Amino acid sequence: MTNCLHDHSRWGEGDQTGAAGHLLDQKTTLSALGKIQSGEIIDLSHTIEMGAPFMPPNQTPYIISSSATAKNSMKIREKMGAKNKVGANLERIEMTTHVGTHIDSLGHFSIGEHLYGGHTIEESVGDWGLLQLGVENIPPIITRGLCLNLSKLDGADCLEAGRPITSDDLKRAYDDHNITPHKGDVVLINTGWGKHFMHDNTKYISGEPGLNEEAARWLTQNDVVAIGSDNMAVEVLPGTNHPDVMMPVHQHCLAEAGVHLIENLALSEISERSINEFCLIMLPVKLKGATGCPVRPVAVI
């Protein structure tokens, strides 16, 4: 892990927006929109539903229940004098914000007491969520998206759990597709592991292929604003130095580099169609104080 525990932000002490807040601008937005040719939209998210995979004990499942039904609310309004048989359906949802396709806020992980931007867990973590670095600080993201299909690196249709993706793997993928890194990119890694999502959830959460720390560092050094993958954590699990070092990619990206992670993506269609470059649009909901947020990123081609 890095020795740089106190220099958490190239944009200064107190920063809350990270790479997305400083590397995205009108130019990156217009450049991304300029890549649209047909206007076709490819959804890169999974449906969030009962039974979606989650990692206990820290994560809790998605649960939805009716808080009002048309039948019952109709009776209530009739007793209030309504004669037009007006019914309404409402629900209550309980979940961790890290179930389904979601984005991590910069306050999601720490290195010891230190959070991104010189913030600390003592000052920034409250009983009712984050006081700084919550998802409400993530700006709307319209930028160039890249999808690197690395699922067949080892000759099968997906990489195996515990298989680290290295910077050399990434560099070869860039070269194979004649892609040059650009400031403000969102890079999505297809490992093939997503095929287990909702088909074999036990296997899906038991481990995963993913980035090792030096690969993540290579991406952040190339000014990405977010990294995503078709797995639970983006990074390889178990890690290359497990159990001595756990979740180093989360620590580096979120607490040091200010780069968001997007997890549980649906990348099979865009990978099968060999679409490597596109306009990515993602607008996280501003849930104040939350460490994550369900998102529906789309590729517009």
Image: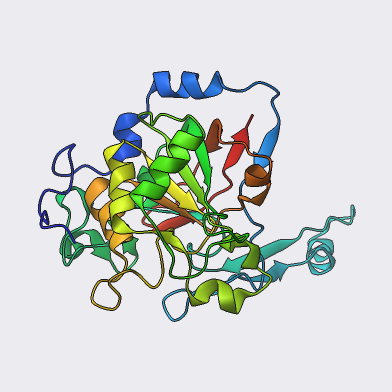
Q: Quadrant of the C terminus?
A: top right
Q: Is residue 110 above or below residue 241?
A: above
Which corner quadrant holds the N terminus? bottom left
Residue 230 found in image quarter:
bottom right
The vertical placement of 157 against 169, above or below, is below
- In the image, residue 61 lies at what x, y percent? 56, 74
Colour theme: rainbow
Residue 17 in sight in this render: no
Does residue 269 appear to the left or right of 95 in the view shown? right
Q: Can residue 47 be seen at all in this image of the molecule?
A: yes
Residue ranking furthest to the front: 155
Instruction: Measuring from the top left, give residue 100's x and y in whole percent.
Output: 57, 61
**Residue 89 versus residue 274: which sits nearer the camera?**
274
Quarter of the image for residue 70 reads bottom right
Q: Quadrant of residue 77?
A: bottom right
Left-right relation of 280 to 259? right
Q: Nearer the viewer, residue 8 or 123?
A: 8
Given residues 19 and 86, the one toward you in this image is: 19
Residue shown at 52%/74% (left/top)?
Answer: 205
Relative image position of residue 25 (x, y in whole percent): 37, 24
Tell me if 28 is positioned left or right of 46 in this view: left
Count of marks, rendered view? 0
Residue at x 44% of width, y 65% of height: 163
Between 80 and 132, the one lying in front of the other is 132
Residue 109 rendering spot, x and y as whole percentages: 29, 62
